[in-house]
């Protein structure tokens, strides 16, 4: 009897969660695609800086008063509940992203064909599933304790993320591998070539209505997109973040990389829900722990335990 009761409770819980995700998915905004924010448009008074980071790109000095002592809520990171559905339609600031969010739903869009160069590049990216089938070692950055990078970090769906909105810059922070991304919002343009490669690239952002549009270039081509997908150093990314209600954040991503893909990639909308009392813990990939794991795991080391 007790087991039957537990099964009924579990089914009801799954039904409630599915209904909530469906309700939020129904309210998502119809994204119109790429938005030109003029990040590369030079004028008589505004020129694109040189891309090299070693010649200086300005120093951010935060001069505001320090925050009041903060009462810690949940260091575990995953025990607290999301914002209740009753708060979804409450008034909110559509330009306020400074909350903790976690993924809830995303559709599966149409696949985009590879170019010949893209097909050749695909053969150099070995996933863990392919390692199990072929014995060839994976070079997935996430599984090698390398920085996950952009835009792969946007696909870390099992870990929460947050935004910090400062006067001249917005910071994106993901709990997974303690990953940080700087988005300049002081009106500067994207730098022009040559630009130093970086795992999270170089980003500028600005508000277009209630949509925070982020343009990113200069992403190190060792980073992946999602799964076994990949890109060149010349790839261009545009993320469009918008709050569609008090509880839900929608992300649309455009990827332009004609060397690899025959057409522009448009991600299906990715929805995340707000967690008002959640503190992100630090989930770094520690190389010493990584190598200890590999040396003591039979699937990684046939001599483990012998």
Image (cartoon, rainbow, N blue to C red):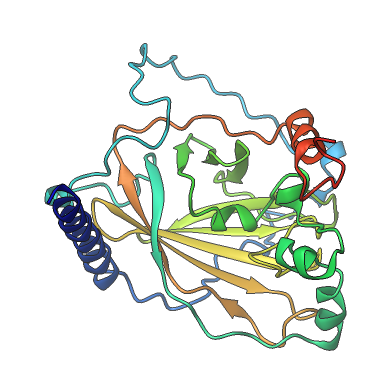
Q: Is residue 199 visible?
A: no
Can you say whether 266 is above or below 74 in the image?
below
The x, y position of residue 168, in whole percent, is 54, 38
Question: Percent position (x, y) of residue 44?
Answer: 69, 59
On the image, which quarter does residue 244 sit in?
bottom left
Q: Where does the C terminus fall, quadrant-wise? A: top right
Give 18 or 229, whichever is nearer the viewer.
18
Q: Could you tell whether 282 is left or right of 284 in the image?
A: left
Q: Residue at x 20, y 63 (%)?
A: 15
**Image spot of residue 187 (x, y percent):** 57, 49
Residue 51, image x and y in percent? 81, 50
Q: Is residue 159 left or right of residue 22?
A: right
Please, is residue 59 above or below residue 37 in the view?
above
Residue name at image x 16 percent, y 53 percent:
9
Of residue 11 and residue 182, the one placed in the foreground of this image is 11
Q: Is residue 269 visible?
A: yes
From the viewer's perspective, is residue 293 above or below residue 3?
A: above
Instruction: Indicate left or right for 22 with 132 as reference.
Output: left
Closer to the camera, 249 or 299? 299
Q: Identify the residue shown where x is 32% and y is 46%.
A: 274
């Amino acid at each position: 009897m007790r087991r039957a009761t537990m099964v009924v409770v579990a089914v009801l819980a799954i039904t409630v969660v599915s209904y909530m995700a469906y309700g939020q998915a129904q309210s998502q905004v119809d994204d119109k695609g790429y938005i030109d924010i003029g990040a590369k448009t030079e004028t008589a008074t505004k020129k694109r800086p040189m891309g090299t980071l070693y010649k200086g790109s300005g120093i951010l000095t935060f001069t505001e008063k320090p925050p009041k002592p903060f009462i810690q809520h949940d260091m575990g990171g995953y025990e607290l509940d999301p914002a209740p559905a009753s708060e979804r339609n409450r008034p909110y600031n559509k330009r306020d992203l400074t909350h903790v969010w976690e993924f809830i739903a995303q559709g599966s869009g149409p696949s985009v064909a590879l170019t010949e160069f893209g097909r050749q590049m695909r053969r150099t990216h070995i996933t863990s599933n392919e390692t199990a089938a072929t014995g060839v070692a994976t070079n997935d950055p996430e599984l090698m304790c390398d920085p996950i990078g952009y835009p792969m970090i946007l696909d870390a769906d099992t870990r929460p993320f947050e935004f910090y909105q400062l006067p001249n810059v917005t910071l994106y922070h993901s709990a997974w591998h303690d990953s940080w991304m700087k988005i300049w919002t002081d009106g500067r343009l994207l730098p022009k070539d040559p630009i130093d490669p970086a795992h999270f690239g170089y980003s500028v952002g600005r508000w277009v209505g209630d949509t925070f549009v982020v343009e990113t270039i200069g992403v190190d081509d060792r980073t992946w997109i999602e799964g076994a997908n990949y890109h060149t150093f010349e790839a261009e990314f545009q993320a469009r973040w918008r709050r569609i209600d008090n509880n839900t954040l929608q992300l649309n991503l455009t990827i332009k990389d004609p060397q690899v893909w025959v057409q522009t990639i448009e991600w299906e909308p990715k929805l995340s829900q707000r967690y008002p009392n959640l503190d992100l813990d630090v989930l770094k990939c520690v190389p010493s722990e990584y190598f200890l794991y590999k040396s003591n795991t039979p699937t990684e080391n046939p001599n483990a335990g012998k």
